Amino acid sequence: MVLNNKRKDIDPLLNFVAKHMININPNTLSWLSLLFALIAGIFFYFSSPNLELNNFCLCIAVFFVFLNGFFDAIDGKIAKLTNKISKKGDFLDHAIDRYADVFIIGGLALSPWCRFNIIGYFAIVGVLLTSYMGTQAQAVGYKRDYSGLLGRADRLVLLMFAPIIQHILLYFTSVGILLELYILEWVLIYFAIVGNITAVQRFYSTLKWFNKSFKK
């Protein structure tokens, strides 16, 4: 995960915010993050090249993607500060994250911005397999695997910046296309390719661990 290496840089800010929200149950924030993901997906779904400069649906979706990522990051911090870390909370957090990924990316994949359904299909497959390989590694006794090229933080950042760039491009061209594809289609292609590569990386990493453990 590219941005996971930068996590320590923003931890002080997240801890500062979390300290002012310790009265809120972290599970409540997890559920709110799911709600924001659903709203983001809805706005992505109803956005379109023809209407974007009038209704700003992409920009509104980006706002809710940000809220989803922020609340997803803050709930764990609050759980640590209030000693409410539990396996149940961890399970809930990861299950909600997967639904959130499907809502957000699915909304975009089903929107007019994605003209080829197969792109959206493989984007969702890549994202889900990436996360599955990471948590399944822990389930079989290895560490939770966050390695690879595309983690959730990377996806959320792309889903915040790419729609804004797509929106801005519409002011300069009537369609906002780069090499015959919308910017948002390129993002989904990136998720499809790099997401599946990341899943394979984590799969291989876990197999290597099995081989080393077996030799011992």
Image (cartoon, grey):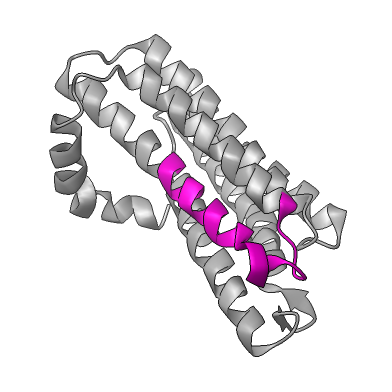
> Is 6 positioned to the left or the right of 152 in the image?
left
Residue 32 placement (x, y as % from top left): 45, 28
Chief secondary structure of the magenta portion = helix
In percent of the image, x 14 and y 46: which residue is there?
A: 12
Residue 194 placement (x, y as % from top left): 61, 58
Residue 114 in the magenta stretch? The answer is no
Q: Quadrant of residue 171?
A: bottom right
In percent of the image, x 29 and y 34: which residue is there?
A: 74
Residue 56 placement (x, y as % from top left): 60, 63
Q: How many marks?
A: 0
> Is 15 positioned to the left or the right of 132 in the image?
left
Q: Which residues are magenta?
A: 46-68
Q: Residue furthest front?
A: 54
Residue 63 in the magenta stretch? The answer is yes
Q: Is residue 87 visible?
A: yes
Judging depth in this view, the residue of 82 and 42 nearest the camera is 42
Judging depth in this view, the residue of 92 and 30 nearest the camera is 30
